[in-house]
Image (cartoon, helix red, strand yellow):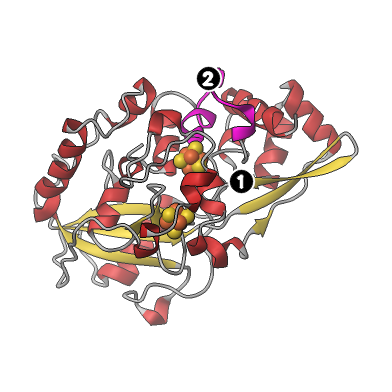
Amino acid sequence: MDSSTLSRRDFLRLLTIGGCAFAVRPGKLLAGKSSDQANPNAAKFRYKYRTMSVKHLPELQDDIDQLKKTGKLSDNPTFQSYVANRKFVVPADFSDAKFIILVAIFTPLMLVNFHYRGKKHEIMVSPQYSGGDYTMDEIKETVQREIILKPGFRMEIARNTFYKRLSVRSGLTTYGRNNITYDDEFGSFLALYGFYTDFEFQEDNWREVAMMESCKTCRICRSRCPNQCITDENFVINAGRCVTLYNEISGEFPDWMNPDAHNALMGCMKCQRECPHNAAVMKLAGRLEDVTEEETERILSGKVDEALLKTLARKLSNFGPTQAQESVPVLTRNLSVLLR
Ligand code: SF4
Ligand code: SF4
C-alpha cells in the first residue's frame, strides 16, 4: 500500500464510517518527555509535532496524483475505497485555515496472555489498536494549550487526508522501507493526528519525501513480510497483499493468504518487530490483563454477551473489536487463527 496514504488508525476510522462499529480510541498518552518544540513546562505525555503551511497542500496533492498516475497505489477494491475520497484540501467551511499541526503520539506495543487448553499464549496487540483513557478532544485541547499557546484560534481535525505523507513532508517522521513512518525516539510505534488552524506559525516545515538512511542497506522488513508486499525499489508497498488490510475488516481471509501470516490480534508486526529502529521501543511493550480459559473459549465460539464484551474492553484496553457486538466476529476470527 502506499500506506503513506493510509495509517492503521485510518483503517479503523474508515471501518467506522463504513458501518463496522469499532469505536476509535487512541493509544494511551504516556507520562514523560514531550516534544522538542512543545512547551517544556507543560509536558504531560510523549508527543512530537511539526507545523506546515496550507500553501503546500497542492504539492501534497501532486504527490498522491503522481502515485496514482504511475500505478503505484494498489488497485485492491477495499484499499481503493479507503483512499478514493482522500485529498489534501482545506475544509470547505474553514477557508481561512493557515497551518496544519501534525502530531505524533507514542503508542506502545501491548502484549496479552490468552489462556487456552491449559497453555498461556502471549499475543501481540499492535501499537494503536488498544486505547487509553483520553479522547480526541483532549488531544485537541493539549494542542491548543501547548502548541498554539494563545487562546481564540480555531482548530479543526484534519479529516479524509493522508497523514503519513503530511507527516513525512513536514519532517515529523520519515518513511521506512515498509511504508510505515518513523520517529527517532518512538520508532514506528506512533499515532498521527492533524489539525487545521487559523493561527499563523513562524515555522513552516517542508521537505522532500525521505526514507530513512539505514533502509538503503537494510532489507530486514522485506525479508520478514509474509506476503511479499515490500519492494527493493521504493517505500510504496502492495497494500492489496498486506495482512493489515484483511484482519481489520470483517469477512473471510483470502485463500491465497497463508494463515501463518497472522501474527497479532489485529494489524501485523512482522515488518516492524525486527526493524533496528524499533529495538528500543520493543522493550517498552506494555502488558494487558490475562484473558482466562473460559473467556478465550467463549470468544472462539463467538458467544460473547454484553457482560463479557465489557470485561474484554477493560482487559484489552478498549481494543477495537471489543467496542461493539457487531465487531466480535473479527475478534473471533483473528484469535482463532492465532490459536490454531
Ligand atoms: S527493517 Fe530495515 S529496511 Fe525496513 S524499515 Fe527498518 S531499517 Fe528500513
Ligand atoms: S509485514 Fe505485515 S504489515 Fe508489513 S507490509 Fe508485510 S503484511 Fe503488511
| Residue beneath the point at 68% across and 37% down | 310
Q: Where is residue 63 in the image (x, y as percent from the top left)?
A: 17, 44
| Quadrant holding the C terminus | top right
Q: Identify the magenta region.
A: 243-261
Q: Give the residue number, with chain letter if any, for mark 2.
A: 254
Q: Tell me the quarter of the picture where residue 145 sits.
A: bottom left
Q: In the displayed structure, does residue 151 sit left or right of residue 218?
A: left
> Marks 1 and 2, Cα distance to the nearest angstrom?
22 Å
Amino acid carrying label 2: it is Pro
**Where does ligand 1 appear, by image quarter?**
bottom left
Amino acid carrying label 1: it is Val
**Residue 205 in sight here:** yes
Q: Earlier in the sequence, mark 1 or mark 2?
A: 1
Residue 270 in the image: above or below residue 213: above
Residue 35 in the image: above or below residue 255: below
Q: Nearer the viewer, residue 224 or 201?
A: 224
